[in-house]
Image: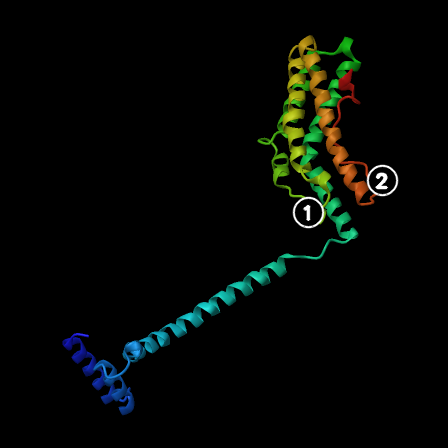
């Protein structure tokens, strides 16, 4: 070790002794090492002695911060566990499932009520014209055209908030295990907006031609059949759920059908 470096180390040792960090025996021991009077194998001890106070100070500084971090982690874990426990609820009882199903049926019926009412008004007007075909007047067709236009609005997403609401009408959590109800709300909205409205469009064209448009009559039969197929599929979804829940006497949600009405004539 260079003389200057040795002198510096000796000065540091002397300073440590004067501060009481080193006892006289430790000072003499470390001094002997620096002067080469002891086996150099243990020379690293000198650095440890000199740096020891710094290391201890650093540890003291890190101590409170480490404890704070550990406390924060524990709190976060507790929050996660509590939320997990609170979000998990016991399985719904059969009675709760039946109540939830009835609630869903009531909500869907309410949202499609204006659409159904409009369709039934059209069926009445169309039925009268078909029944009295020979004596049907221009005013009868005007009335049919007006009813078809109103029904089309009542079944549209943009014209009826009930139809729009179907997309956000979520199946109650108590019915989450019933697969047939997974998309029943959106399917009902699709039936009203995309299957019923084309039927009304065909009826409007038929009315505007005073019942003389063969193409409108032919397209009416096609679109009416498509609408009925969609409606019957939705009714089957509800019926399957009712059967799974053990509900007897379920009569469906009453979606308007055309093939059993006078429109098929």
Occupied quadrant, residue 21: bottom left
Label 1: which secondary element: loop
Quadrant assignment for the N terminus: bottom left
Total tally of numbered discs in the picture: 2
In the image, residue 71 above or below residue 17: above
Q: Which residue is labeled 1 in the image?
A: 172
Q: Residue at x 77, y 8 (%)?
A: 134
Outermost residue toward the right? 249
Occupied quadrant, residue 86: bottom right
Q: Is residue 213 visible?
A: no
In the image, residue 104 above or below residue 28: above
Measured as percent of width and height from the top left, residue 78 is found at 55, 65
In the image, residue 165 above or below residue 150: below
Q: Is residue 113 visible?
A: yes
Q: Which residue is labeled 2 in the image?
A: 249
Q: Is residue 12 left or right of residue 195?
A: left
Q: Residue at x 31, y 77 (%)?
A: 41
Outermost residue toward the bottom? 24
Q: Residue at x 64, y 41 (%)?
A: 169
Dot 2 surroundings within 10 Å: few (below 14), some, or many (20 or more)? few
Label 2: which secondary element: loop
Measured as percent of width and height from the top left, residue 214 is found at 69, 8
Dot 1 surroundings within 10 Å: few (below 14), some, or many (20 or more)? some
**Could you give the CA–CA distance between mark 1 and mark 2, rounded to whole angstroms?**
22 Å
Measured as percent of width and height from the top left, residue 26 is found at 29, 88
- Which callout, 1 or 2, points at the residue further toward the start of the chain? 1
Q: Is residue 229 left or right of residue 83?
A: right
């Amino acid at each position: 070790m260079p003389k200057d470096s040795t002198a510096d180390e000796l000065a540091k040792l002397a300073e440590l002794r004067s501060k009481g960090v080193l006892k006289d025996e430790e000072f003499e021991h470390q001094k002997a090492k620096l002067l080469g009077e002891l086996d150099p194998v243990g020379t690293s001890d000198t650095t440890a002695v000199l740096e020891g106070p710094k290391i201890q100070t650093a540890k003291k500084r890190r101590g409170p911060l480490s404890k704070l971090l550990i406390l924060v982690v524990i709190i976060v874990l507790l929050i996660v566990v509590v939320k997990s426990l609170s979000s998990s609820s016991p399985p719904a009882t059969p009675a709760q499932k039946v109540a939830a199903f009835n609630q869903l049926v009531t909500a869907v019926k309410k949202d499609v009520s204006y659409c159904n009412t409009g369709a039934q008004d059209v069926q009445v007007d169309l039925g009268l014209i078909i029944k009295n075909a020979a004596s049907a007047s221009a005013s009868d067709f005007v009335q049919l055209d007006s009813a078809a236009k109103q029904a089309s609005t009542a079944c549209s997403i943009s014209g009826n908030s009930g139809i729009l609401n179907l997309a956000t009408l979520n199946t109650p959590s108590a019915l989450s295990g019933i697969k047939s109800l997974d998309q029943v709300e959106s399917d009902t909205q699709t039936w009203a907006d995309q299957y019923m409205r084309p039927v009304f469009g065909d009826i409007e064209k038929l009315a505007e031609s005073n019942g003389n448009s063969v193409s409108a009559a032919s397209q009416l039969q096609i679109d009416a059949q498509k609408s009925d197929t969609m409606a019957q599929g939705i009714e089957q979804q509800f019926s399957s759920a009712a059967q799974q829940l053990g509900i007897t006497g379920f009569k469906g949600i009453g979606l308007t059908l055309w093939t059993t009405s006078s429109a098929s004539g």
